Image: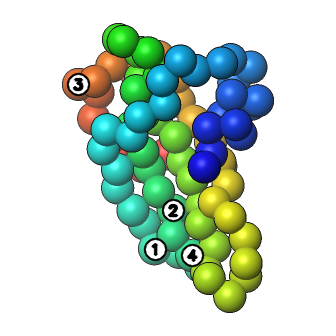
Amino acid sequence: QVKPQFESQANTNCVEFKAIEYKTQVVAGTMYFIKVQVSNAEYVHVKVFEALPHENQGPSLVGFQTGKTRDDPLTYF
């Protein structure tokens, strides 16, 4: 759901956008830290916030880190 937001903010078009791994952090909603494969050997880490259900908001991209590999550890940022 956040692929268009990522492509817009990173000024790129992704051939692939496949979640590989994720971690969560509960705040006033849920923060997701997701390792995403964007091409054959290129990965990004995205930070997505999902508000509580009663707020009726979809997930939103909060930040991202590019230039990652499949072996890079997924950390909170």
Q: Is residue 57 left or right of residue 42?
A: right
The residue furthest bottom is: 54
| Amino acid type for the residue under numbered disc 4 | Gly
**SS at mark 1 in the image:** strand
Instruction: Look at mark 4 in the image and give the residue it sits on.
Output: 29
Instruction: Look at mark 2 in the image and give the residue it sits on.
Output: 31
Q: Earlier in the sequence, mark 1 or mark 3?
A: 1
Residue drawn at (68%, 17%) of the image: 12
Mark 1 nearby-residue class (10 Å; few <14, some 14–19, many ≥20): few
Mark 2 nearby-residue class (10 Å; few <14, some 14–19, many ≥20): many
**SS at mark 2 in the image:** strand
Q: Are marks 2 and 1 in contact (CB under 8 Å)?
A: yes
Q: Determine the CA span between mark 4 and mark 3.
A: 28 Å
| Amino acid type for the residue under numbered disc 1 | Val
Name the foreground residue: 23 vs 12.
Answer: 12
Q: Are marks 2 and 4 in contact (CB under 8 Å)?
A: yes
Name the foreground residue: 25 vs 3.
Answer: 3
Q: Earlier in the sequence, mark 4 or mark 3?
A: 4
> x and y percent of residue 47 in the render?
54, 48
Q: Is residue 6 visible?
A: yes
Residue drawn at (61%, 80%) of the image: 52
Instruction: Look at mark 1 in the image and give the residue it sits on.
Output: 26
- Is 16 situated above or below 77? above
| Amino acid type for the residue under numbered disc 3 | Asp
Q: Is residue 68 left or right of residue 46?
A: left
Instruction: Look at mark 3 in the image and give the residue it sits on.
Output: 71
Q: Determine the CA span between mark 1 and mark 4.
A: 6 Å
Name the foreground residue: 57 vs 61.
Answer: 57
**SS at mark 4 in the image:** strand
Q: Determine the CA span between mark 2 and mark 4.
A: 7 Å
> x and y percent of residue 14 in the render?
58, 20
